[in-house]
Amino acid sequence: MAEWFKEHGEKDDVVLSTRIRLARNLKGIPFPNKMNADDAQRGIDLVEGALEEMNYTFTKVDLPSMSQAEKQKLVEERYISPNLASSSLPCAAYISEDQKVSIMINEEDHLRIQCIYAGFEEQKALELIGRVDDYLSEKLDYAMHEKYGYLTSCLTNVGTGMRISYMLHLSATVMSGAADSVFAAVAKLGATVRGMYGEGTKSAGNLFQISNQTTLGRSEAEIAASLGETLGSIISKERELRAKLSEKKGLILEDRIMRSYAIVRSARIMQSKEMMDRLSDVRFGIGLGIIDDADYTTLNDIMICASPAHISADFGIDGAVERDVKRAEMLREALNR
Amino acid sequence: MLCSNCGVKDANFHYKHISGGQLTELHLCSDCAKELGYIKDSDAPFGLGSLFGDFLSSPKAPSQTALRCPQCSTSFDSVRRTGFLGCDKCYEVFSKPVESMLAKIQPSTVHKGKLSGADGKKIARDNTLKNLKEELKRAIIDEKYEQAAVLRDKIKELEAKEGENNG
């Protein structure tokens, strides 16, 4: 099975990915912010024991033996968080054979179970992560509370422990200067907008993550439905603005898109930020039907495979300039087929 | 200044505690100060005793469980400052500040989502029973005896199942 970013998904003109994570903790063991190395190892052993008996195969990612670039590669593919990659505690990650589910041990909580799909796939993701969680809850003693449900180390995750995040490409919203007002409206509806890799990270290439802000007091289905509604309005707004921009600035917009497309197919040196910005234009061009010989999946794939840590780890290139040369070469290869 | 325990009322009791060279400052409302054993009932709320309580009398030692979690030694000051708890036990030990902090950041403080695993299923059963018993009470008050009989049977059935599960 291929990684999530090599697949197609619904509504992928705007939605790049659907990610759901559940925060779970084990009874009687201090949370990661308070645990010592022995506690941390005990948590890993317990989860590993439970996963071994499961008829959905997980492969352990041996984080302690990996280089920083290899770990960062998993961050770029969104299988692990930046926090886990830099953790000093004994920690572990497991990735399912179909590459849809990953489980992080000793991140902010003992378990962070995560499920990721390309495009908009709320139902599939809810169903799959629910199955993995149900199985683990039979094997492990989760920390639970009669009133608060699943207990987590931070009070912002208590209850369902669930965060649904959609990665969105909002080029027209940004270009039209509507981003601030759209994001303010999103916040009023109880959702949060963040940069590409989660909390505290910046946006690149007009990519944003929106997710539910609260986790307690509403069921998983209610949280999903409410965020889904917010997502629906963001998507309609973005599509509406794309149509407007295309109508008003047809030739100027087309020129900008085609220039970007020409550059990613010809450049000899390409920095990461420029790649993100150019690919954002190309993505817009595909959406408007101006570009018909490239597709969203190719863009998702190259965007991740030409990220800094991927180039460092896959080609053993450490220098920034050499990386930029390699990135340009990869882009030419991917987009000149 | 708000009470560092409940986070709701004004703090009118200020306590400094030196242990192992570490100075800890506590700011409590009179109710929490009483509950945590810093002042006696007769001292509250503004008697001389509460102002000089530390010096005039020897109040009983503050209960360790209330100051620090016995399982992970997280202090409630750190919970209040960071919103992070150290373990599952902290939720019992710091139940008051946790409840008031959750009320501020979450739409409700009652979990409505799924409950999985043995503990989760037990919590779900207990909640159902509790709700049925409340409905039964209401039905009796409203003199809806037929409905009450149905509810009573349901409760009996659930309790019998519970007995089987425990046995």
Image (spheres, coloured by chain):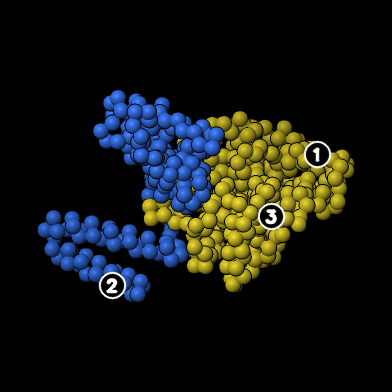
Residue for badge 1: A271
For the residues labelled 2 and 1, the Cα–Cα distance comes to 68 Å
Mark 2 Cα within 10 Å, few/some/many (few <14, many 20+)?
few
A27 lies left or right of B144? right
Q: Which of marks 2 and 3 is in front?
A: 2
Residue where numbered disc 2 is placed: B160
Indicate the chain on which mark 1 is placed: A
According to the image, label 3 marks what residue? A5
Callout 3 amino acid: Phe
Residue B132 percent location from the top left of the image: 25, 61
Question: What residue lies at 56% left-to-right and 39% top-to-bottom?
Answer: A193
| Percent x, y of residue A30 | 53, 52
Residue A266 in view in this figure: no
Q: In which quarter of the image is the C terminus of chain A?
A: bottom right
Query: Which shade is chain B?
Result: blue
x, y percent for residue B58:
36, 34
Helix, strand or loop under label 2 = helix
Q: Of circles 2 and 1, which is in front?
A: 2
- A53 or A301: nearer the viewer: A53
Chain of residue at mark 3: A
The kind of residue tagged 1 is: Gln
